[in-house]
Amino acid sequence: MNFPKKTALPGLSQPFDHHGVAFNMVKAFGPTLLETRLPEDIFSKMLQMTDDLLEDPNRKSYGDSLVGQIREEPEITLDLLKQYGVYDYIHGLFAEYILGCSYCDADPEYKQSVTAFQQSADYVNPVNVKIEAAWLVSQYQGEYNPIHNHSSSTLSSVMYLKVPETMNEDPIPGKARLDGHIEWVDRSTDVMQNSTLRVKPEAGRFYIFPATLLHLVYPFKGSEERRSISINATHQL
């Protein structure tokens, strides 16, 4: 699968590549978000894991803990992430996100010290991260996620595995095509600052953001599946 080379998010982007883990810290509106493209092997493992999970008759629904108007939201256990060999990659990105946020908002002297630290051969990210919950969102026509946040954690994320080729089969002339998009909503009321960020999902994209950041997913039209994974975590410096 060939992933796009450019970032999907608009705004000021700071690229990072620490010991083979590449991502971008993007300031598109209020908070800074991490955006990356999953490596081919991770993407393939996530697809296989979710295919197997959806075929498992004993899968456990996580839907009772969620606000989404979606029928199929099975739980993804930490053991399952480890079994398919993707846990360390995801865990590491959460930790890198915290350091990335500190770096982007720091003065030049601090940035220089962080860069030197991260480029050292014995670099180990000092952020303590605990993955709290993960679940699959297998979304079909008419299903949606109303505006919400994840207040029980400090970090949230969304990973896209399948995106329909067409999510708006009967668009309204002159209107923006929002079907199937995710939208983040910052609480800022500053008229000089964007308070929302809307993005069309792409298979292979992975985003990490503050758990308190409001977000929603619009419904779409069409027969194909829109498949994503959400993962929540807490952290300590």
Image (cartoon, rainbow, N blue to C red):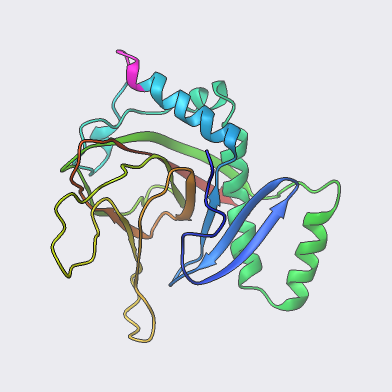
Camera-nearest residue between 226 and 216: 226
Horizontal side of 44 relative to 180 (left or right) equals: right
Where is residue 85 shown, x and y percent of the image? Answer: 59, 26
Residue farthest to the right, as pictured = 121
- Tell me which secondary structure the magenta stretch mostly adopts: loop
Query: Does 203 appear above or below 28?
Result: above
The quarter of the rendered structure image containing the C terminus is bottom right
Horizontal side of 205 relative to 215 (left or right) equals: right
Where is residue 144 shown, x and y percent of the image? Answer: 21, 46
The quadrant where residue 229 appears:
top left
**x 55%, y 42%: residue:** 38
**x 45%, y 29%: residue:** 47
Residue 101 in magenta stretch: no
Residue farthest to the top, as pictured = 57
Camera-nearest residue between 28 and 101: 28
Query: Does 85 appear above or below 158?
Result: above
Where is residue 170 shown, x and y percent of the image? Answer: 14, 53
Highlighted magenta segment, given as a residue range: 54-59
Query: Does 39 appear above or below 149?
Result: above
The quadrant where residue 112 appears:
bottom right
Horizontal side of 29 relative to 98 (left or right) equals: left
Camera-nearest residue between 73 and 133: 73
**x 52%, y 55%: residue:** 35
Where is residue 161 shown, x and y percent of the image? Answer: 42, 38
